């Protein structure tokens, strides 16, 4: 049992290289280190993953059923397209879902304004860069159900 699963979608493995003027200099490894640091301080265990494949993200969400207490997801471009990820997230009963984006998609191109993740997320944090993941962990630590005995 892991407390929090943190999922990252396509192209987030290229952070630091990818459009740095938009996404900043931090790599995904830096983001993971930030999360591990914050989770440790909050006494939470995390499983931090990234995939460029929609189906792999769907499978990971399915496998997390009954094994996690909270989910943080930056579905990247799949945010705006994936009914499959939306449907998978609906399988997670009693698991608070926090949607995170480094940038704020609502202030960018119109095709980024629709979020399928938002339809099931309990909370969205957008535009805070890597610190958004830290804020998401803090939020989860306040709202997650207690570990089952
Ligand atoms: C993103 C925003 C998405 O629109 C984009 O496709 C990404 C990254 C963000 O973190 O700002 O890949 O999710």
Image: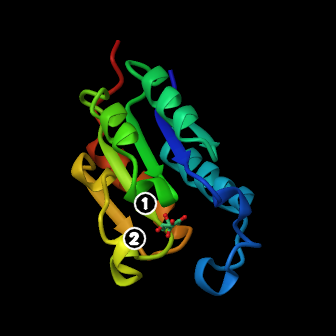
User: Circle 1: is it few (<14), some (14-19), or many (20+) Cα within 10 Å?
Assistant: many
Can residue 40 be seen here? The reply is yes
Secondary structure, mark 1, is: strand
Colour logic: rainbow
Q: Secondary structure at mark 2?
A: strand
In the image, is residue 135 above or below residue 50? below
Number of residues whose C-alpha sits closer than 10 Å to that of mark 2, classed few (under 14), some (14–19) or many (20 or more): some
In the rendered structure, are the residues bearing label 2 and label 1 in contact, judged by CB atoms less than 8 Å apart? yes
Horizontal and vertical percent for residue 15? 69, 67
Residue furthest right as drawn: 17
Q: Position of residue 20 (x, y in %)?
A: 69, 81
Q: Please tell me in which quadrant of the rendered image residue 40 appears.
A: top right
* Residue behind label 2 places its C-beta within 8 angstroms of ligand 1: yes
Q: Residue at x 33, y 77 (%)?
A: 106
User: Nearer the N terminus, badge 2 or badge 1?
Assistant: 1
For residue 45, which numbered disc appears in the image? Answer: none
Instruction: Judge from the rendering whether residue 13 lies leftward or rightward of residue 73; answer left or right.
Output: right
Relative depth, front residue between 46 and 60: 60
Q: Is residue 111 left or right of residue 78?
A: left
**Residue 16, above or below 22:** above
Residue 133 location (% of width, % of height): 49, 59
Residue 45 seen in the figure: no
Q: Where is residue 28 drawn, in percent x and y?
A: 69, 59
Seen in the picture, residue 97 relative to 131 is either above or below; the reply is above
Q: On the image, numbered disc 2 is attached to which residue?
A: 126
The residue that disc 1 covers is 100
Residue at point 63%, 49% (across, down): 36
Tell me the residue at 70%/73% (across/down): 18
Q: Determine whether the beta carbon of the residue marked 1 sits less than 8 angstroms from the nearest atom of ligand 1.
A: yes
């Amino acid at each position: 049992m892991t407390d929090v699963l943190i999922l990252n979608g396509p192209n987030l493995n290229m952070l630091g290289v990818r459009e740095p003027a938009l996404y900043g200099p931090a790599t995904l490894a830096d983001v993971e280190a930030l999360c591990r640091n914050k989770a440790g301080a909050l006494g939470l265990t995390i499983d931090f993953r990234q995939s460029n494949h929609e189906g792999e993200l769907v499978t990971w969400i399915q496998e997390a059923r009954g094994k996690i207490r909270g989910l943080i997801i930056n579905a990247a471009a799949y945010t705006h397209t994936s009914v499959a990820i939306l449907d998978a997230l609906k399988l997670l009963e009693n698991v608070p879902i926090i949607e995170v984006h480094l940038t704020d998609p609502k202030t960018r191109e119109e095709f980024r304004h629709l979020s399928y993740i938002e339809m099931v997320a309990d909370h969205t944090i957008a535009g805070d860069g890597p610190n958004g993941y830290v804020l998401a962990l803090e939020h989860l630590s306040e709202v997650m159900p207690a570990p089952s005995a």
